[in-house]
Image (spheres, rainbow, N blue to C red):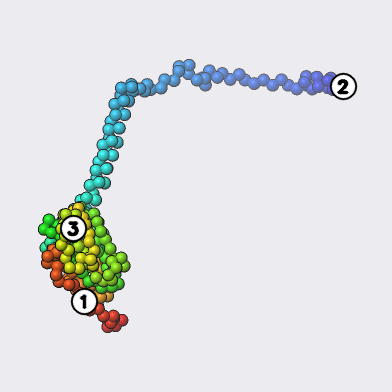
Amino acid sequence: MRLPALTQRLRLSLPLLSFPRVSLGRFSPSRRPLRLPRLVRPDGLTLARWGLVLLAGLFLGGIIHILVVMRVPSMVHQTAYARVAEFGPDGSFNRLPDSLPGAEPLPLLDPQMLHAACRFDLDTGPVRIMAALPPPFWSFALFNAQGEAIYSLNDRTSGNGGTLDVLVLTSAQLSQVRENPPIGLEDMIVIETAEDRGYALLRAFGGDPVRRSITEEALSAARCTGLEESGVIVTLPATTDTAPAGQ
């Protein structure tokens, strides 16, 4: 039997399958178009106004930030110069209280160091600063009235060990001193400055109670006087290497 004839007989023997017709009318999407809410589109003038407001705010904020950053250091320094006067009269070294957290007498002081400060005014003449500070470390710094450091040295850079002898003066005063030099001028550290007012700061390591007592005595003996009044020679207090009892 041929294959085509067999296929035709099978087709005739199978019942016809019929499927019900399903109407898709109720499932068809609505013919009405979907309407989105109408958005308000700003015109060019409104956008320009908002842009100007934003730029003005950024510009004003930048100016305020710059003014604050520039103002804060000067306020700190002026406060430091003014606070030096609270610890004693001008023209002499005055011992500063110990630097404790939240109770610093001046900004940026090391709590491990002992400090003494002296305010001066060159309008009355040159100022001679003399001190004899003990080891192991001490330093000297000179600040103007704005709180800017104009000179500094320590025991390793002074060249005189524990002895400090500094003459602070203006350019006009230096010319006068050269015409009539005082005795020992060649041994002094001469600091010429254009500032009339300022303050000097001595820092020395306190250490154990014995060395602390010696350091406090040395700071008390430091001098910050006019050139005419500086005839007294400052000597280093006697030191001892004896350790405190119990060490």
Badge 3 or badge 2: first in the primary sequence? 2
Q: Which residue was labeled with disc 1?
A: 237
In this orientation, which residue lies closer to the viewer: 157 or 26?
A: 157
Mark 2 residue type: Arg
Query: Where does residue 59 sit, x and y in percent of width and height?
Result: 28, 35
Please name the residue shown 81% across and 22% down the image: 7
In this orientation, which residue lies closer to the viewer: 137 or 101?
A: 137
Q: Which mark is residue 127?
A: none
Mark 3 residue type: Leu
Distance, label 2 to label 1, CA atoms, is: 136 Å
Residue neighbourhood size for the residue with mark 1, other residues' Cα within 10 Å, grouped as few (<14), some (14–19), many (≥20): some
**Badge nearest the viewer, 3 or 2:** 3
Mark 1 residue type: Pro
Please name the residue shown 22% across and 61% down the image: 190
Instruction: Tell me how many marks there are.
Output: 3
Please name the residue shown 45% across and 16% down the image: 32
Please indicate whether residue 141 sits to the left or right of residue 13 in the image: left
Badge 3 or badge 1: first in the primary sequence? 3
Q: Which residue was labeled with disc 3?
A: 174
Element type at mark 3: helix
Q: Is residue 181 above or below residue 240?
A: above
Distance, label 3 to label 2, CA atoms, is: 135 Å
Can you say which quadrant of the picture contains the N terminus?
top right
Q: Which residue was labeled with disc 2?
A: 2
The residue lying furthest to the right in this view is 1
